[in-house]
Amino acid sequence: MASSSSSTTNPQEKYDVFLSFRGEDTRLSFTSHLCAALKRKQFLTFIGYELNRGEEISPSLLKAIEESKFSVVVFSENYASSKWCLEELAKILECKKTKGQMVIPVVYGVDPTHVRNQVGSFADAFARHEQLLKEKMDKVWNWRAAMEEAAGIQRKLSVCIDVAVECLIFCSGLLQLKTTMSSMFIRSASEFVEDIGTEAIEGICLEMSESREMHLKSDACSGMDCLRLLKFYDNFSWDDIFLMDNKDKVHLPHSGLDYLSDKLRYLHWDGFPLKTLPQNFCAENIVELIFPGSKIERFWTGVQNLVHLRRIDLSGSPYLLEIPDISKAKNIESINLKFCKSLIDVHSSIQFLNKLEVLQLSYCDNLTRLPSSIGSKVLRILEQQWTAIEEVPSSIEFLTALVRLYMTNCKQLSSLPTSICKLKSLEIHGLSSCSKLEHFPEIMELMESLRRFELDPTAIQELPSSIKHLKFFTQLKLGVTAIKELSSSIVQLKSLTHLDLGGTAIQELPSSTISLKCLKHLDLSGTVIKKLPELPLSLAALEVNDWESLETLSRFNLSNFPELNFAKCFKLDHKELLADMQLKIQDTP
């Protein structure tokens, strides 16, 4: 009741590969590509389709498993829900024990730990089987044991077929599908690992979080002339990135790597342990260069023609001193240099990157300046929080597509150029904790997209009257600034919904505040204002904690507030406040 992908359908033939998979999950995706690749490489492949759900597995199918040299098991979301698949798996593991058959598990579209620990959809499936097969619990236990054993095999494979799925994104055609097939099926696993330098290898993918430590030789990649994908990755969080020194799983000698294939397109190595790449490495085919938490200091010298490069991620590389000349990376879209604490400069070649959309420089403690020009007119996000930059170049006005500009905690930043008003697409500008920033630039033109300014806490003493050009502004954070007086032009911010004045030296709130018809949240905590004027009826949240100077409240709609906390408002006439509230309660229908 099964069919073969080979030129014959006779199940009595000797097969190279038996393929076990859940049809509804992978038949039209991964499995079809895998079968096509195997057929092109002339591997005789038997596919175990479940034609009639509920029937016992056919003897011919069991015989096909017995007569196959290798079995590939594709674990997908609903694999364990099929009794047919589980019967195949049990037979495959039996043949592994009795006939020495090689078993290659592949995890597709599901967390490998779900297979390994039989949780998630796998737990649900086995629970249903146990409910329906109460009289045949030994069969269910046998299935569980088979899956546990197969998952154990998957953990030991350092070169996994799931590299094929990764390559689909980064390589043309289906070259990646012969990544391991062309050699894995003609020699044993041990021989394959020992001869991993074979020229047939096109991809290596290793998830390191639960892998044992590996010590590679300098010539580990020598001879891998067709290598297109090299991925050693770890599922670490940003909290872990500072501990990468203690998380290294792949070790290399001090002499480094002798060779990396010039055909590499995807190079991802979390915690890369070397100071530099091989001197003879040509990166001209690289599409993505991902080295988070690495020990790298420098890359190549000179200029490489990086026409295919789309993304660089060197985040959390504390020893990185410089990035190379990338002027020929005309198609690069994203550069991530966050937490590169030794980086003091960004190469001026960045001005030639016309397709750059994201530039992340946050937490580069020693970065003192930006390039005089950033050439991309499609740059959307510029992050430079916690850097030592002292000024923003006036050329920033040419970043007309910029949507988010983050500069919080830039302790040396003292001024902003007036040309910032040219950023017509800017929506968010974060300047919180820029402690030397004393002057807010004049906004000489209408900025229709800007919605939020974060100026808390800074040394800014006043807002210019030109703030009126921020007509669509919704959030203004001025908490703990040196501002003593609120500009009357603030009432022209008709879209303002959130106003934070907490901890400022403002002594009086303009009576015109009532004109802010969209205002919903007002923070006056810790201010020195003595009298609260009439406030807009739209206000739904008022923060007045630690407002020790508050003496009187003008009558305003207290019923809008589900909760008001006047703690530490020692000068406030509480009797008058209670009387007002009693009147409000009486008026409530």
Image (spheres, rainbow, N blue to C red):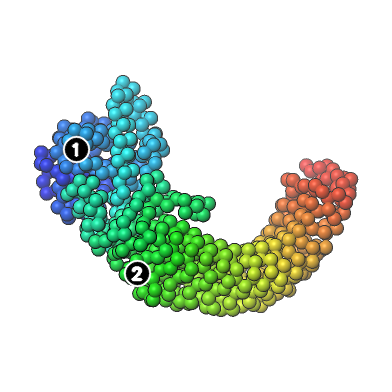
- Mark 1 → mark 2, Cα distance in angstroms: 44 Å
In this rendered view, identify the residue nearer to me: 436 or 321. Answer: 321
Mark in front: 1 vs 2: 2
Q: Residue at x 18, y 45 (%)?
A: 17
Q: Amino acid at mark 1?
A: Gly
Estimate how packed mark 1 is, as few (under 14), some (14 to 19) or many (20 or more) residues with alpha carbons within 10 Å: few
Left or right relative to 418: residue 44: left
Q: Secondary structure at mark 1?
A: loop
Left or right relative to 14: residue 89: right
- Residue 388 seen in the current view: yes
Q: Secondary structure at mark 2?
A: loop
Label number found at residue 65:
none
- Residue 168 seen in the current view: no
From the image, which quarter does the C terminus lie in? Answer: top right
From the image, which quarter does the N terminus lie in? Answer: top left
> Residue under circle 1?
100
316 shown above or below 568: below
> Residue under circle 2?
279
- Dividing the picture into quadrants, the one containing residue 167 is bottom left
Q: Position of residue 173 (x, y in %)?
A: 26, 61
Q: Amino acid at mark 2?
A: Gln
Q: Residue at x 31, y 56 (%)?
A: 217
360 shown above or below 144: below
Q: Residue at x 33, y 54 (%)?
A: 216
